[in-house]
Amino acid sequence: MSVITEEAVEDKLSFWPRHQEALYRRLESKHSWLEEKGLVREKEADPLEHEMTLNIGPQHPATHGVLRCAVKLDGETIQKCVIDIGYLHRGLEKVAENKTYQEFMPYTDRMDYLSPYSNNVAWCLAVEKIAGIEAPERAQWIRMMMCELARISAHLLWMGVGLMDAGAVSVFLWSFKFREDIYSIFDEIAGQRLTVSHSRIGGIASEPSEQGLAMIKAFADSFPEVVAGWKKLLNRNRIWIDRNVGIGTLTADEVIEFGMTGPNLRGSGVPYDVRRFEPYLKYDDVDFIIPMREEGDSLARYFIRLEEMEESVKIIQQCLAKLPSVGGPIRVDDAKKGYPSKDEVYYSMEGLIHDFMYTDTGVCPPKGVWSYHAIEAPKGELGFYLQSDGTGHPYRARMNTPSFTNLQALEPMMEGAPMGDMVILIGTIDPVLGESDK
Amino acid sequence: MSKLEFHFTPVDGPSETEDSPNPHAKSTTFVPEAVKALQDTFGDDVQEVFLYANEHTVYVSKDRIVDVCRYLKEELGFTYLVDIGGIDLFTDEDRYEVFYNLVNLKEGKRLRLKTRVDEESSSLPSVTGVYRAAGWNEREAWDMFGLRFEGHPDLRRMFMPEDFEYHPLRKEFPLLGVPGSLPLPPQTPEAGLTLDPFAAAHGSKPIKSYEEAASDE
């Protein structure tokens, strides 16, 4: 192998020169959040060269994926920050326009890959809304239960990784033990550990097995004790509190201004949760509270996520108690709206034809209409705006993803923070780049 | 295990009629008062009002979009901007549409604004002055559709690099991409830039990081 010359390195590694140039120009020219608020002192001379420009990511493990933060440092303090995303852009909206509604559902697993079940359900509900399909009651209860399991799984990862960022590796292993339990439940019920793809338009793919329900029951029974253990370990933990209290503080007005969503919004005292705002599935039939905090710092968001896990367990318990009394099919009983059952497909000609037609064309919502349906995913409002041209493909599928919405506020949150808090701030926003980059 | 009972020959027809309202219709998206207030205040600039699945959509002319947004935010309490997105209708007139998804947190109401944008100018005023949260959403619409938001403080592309010359969500953009439009880093030190993530689909051969032994023939 030949040694490459210096010019060649420059030539080959400086791809996308216009992109880099625009990014750094923005970093130089932008007014930081502190400047906008008038909190910046008169600029002094910099004889010791404290200022430096630093790129963190996109391949840095602490950035939770391929997030790139170009920051301008003054000593240890971040003066300005420009976030660059898109390194995981797959053009999902373009893909959706070229797939049938049902065909696109597995792609949603790859958006927020920490809670795939919520994404499946969000997509199916959006399609059901535009096409006017109602899933049977039993399917709705099962969907709700699984969505809450996905929420616990996503918050577990947030907690483990967030604590690992703060230097506590043992909690990471501890929380992953329970993520593993949830993966086993998904494996039993959906046949997949990560990319579950279990929801179908008009219902769900298969009836959960007895064993699967027993696993959920065992998990829901044992989990509150685990959360109590974490509370014992963390709520009075000097290091964890000191790393979080007063970090990334946002007021209620600011979070609305930045358009943040999910626990980040509720941590600043804005009571917005889609489960309450416009209840979908059976959320108005279960008893749970929406955890709220008013401090608006990272610690408040930690408490909210921890309490949300407890509330999710409550919802799961209620679903489990309700399920035996909700009989009936798990998928809508109409070949224009949902897949026929496999028995039907294997043993009747009509069933086979319907299965073929559904795969080939699928749901056709009315021509020229549009609708938006949102759910409360673990990270916030996940909504799909769909526009139909009367065919089996969406004419336009717009995804409103919580990670994208939240990441926008990371720039002002970082500005003025010490460099050491950067990982805490990224952790507290809880972004998933697969989702924000679409 | 409960079995699906299945009835053959489903009935064709419109899925939403007067008798069967949309099962997912929410009361939050039905905002006749806000629509009325907009019509009274802005007159002809409120072009059309659509209602589907109990969701109100108000078309406003693009010149007044900032005023409408400011009015909605300051007078009617729609303080929270959820989403902005572009739509390519691929028509001769008014090819693009941009929708704005607003929420009134106090009263628990949702409203969607839409505005039409013609292909020739492909530009409309930015609402970042009213809703700061619009910043990234408008950048995304610029990136994906090439809609220029006048007055946006930082209209860089959102996902694609600046070196990319196309707007991929436009309907004429091919699904497999344009070969050579997006250079990627070389795969070996000696090789040149990789020109396409889907190179094989366009008939080019992947670069190998090893040398193949010469065959005996």
Image (cartoon, rainbow, N blue to C red):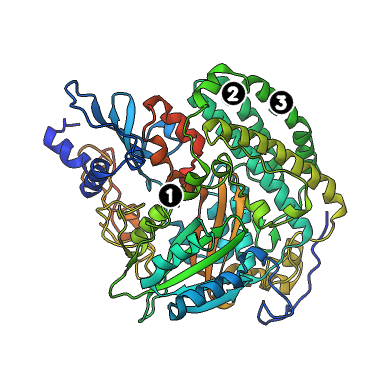
Read off the chain for label 2: A
Q: Name the residue beneath numbered marker 3.
A: A228
**What distance separates the C-alpha of mark 1 from that of mark 2?**
29 Å
Residue nearest the viewer, comparing A260 with A86: A260
Left or right side of A8 for B82: right
Left or right side of B7 for A278: left
Read off the chain for label 3: A
Residue A423, how many percent across, how many down?
A: 44, 30
Residue B83, how many percent across, how many down?
A: 48, 58
Residue nearest the viewer, comparing B121 with A94: B121
Q: Residue at x 40, y 51 (%)?
A: A89
Q: Residue at x 56, y 41 (%)?
A: A114
Please report contact status of discs 3 and 2: CB closer than 8 Å, yes or no: no
Q: Dividing the picture into quarters, in which one does residue A154 lie?
A: top right
Residue B36, how many percent across, how many down?
A: 56, 75
Disc 3 marks a residue whose amino acid type is Ala
Q: Nearer the viewer, mark 3 or mark 2?
A: 3
Left or right side of B100 for B91: left
Q: Which mark is residue A171?
A: 2
Q: Residue at x 57, y 39 (%)?
A: A267
Q: Residue furthest top?
A: A238
Q: Name the residue beneath numbered marker 1.
A: A437
> How many labels sit on residues?
3
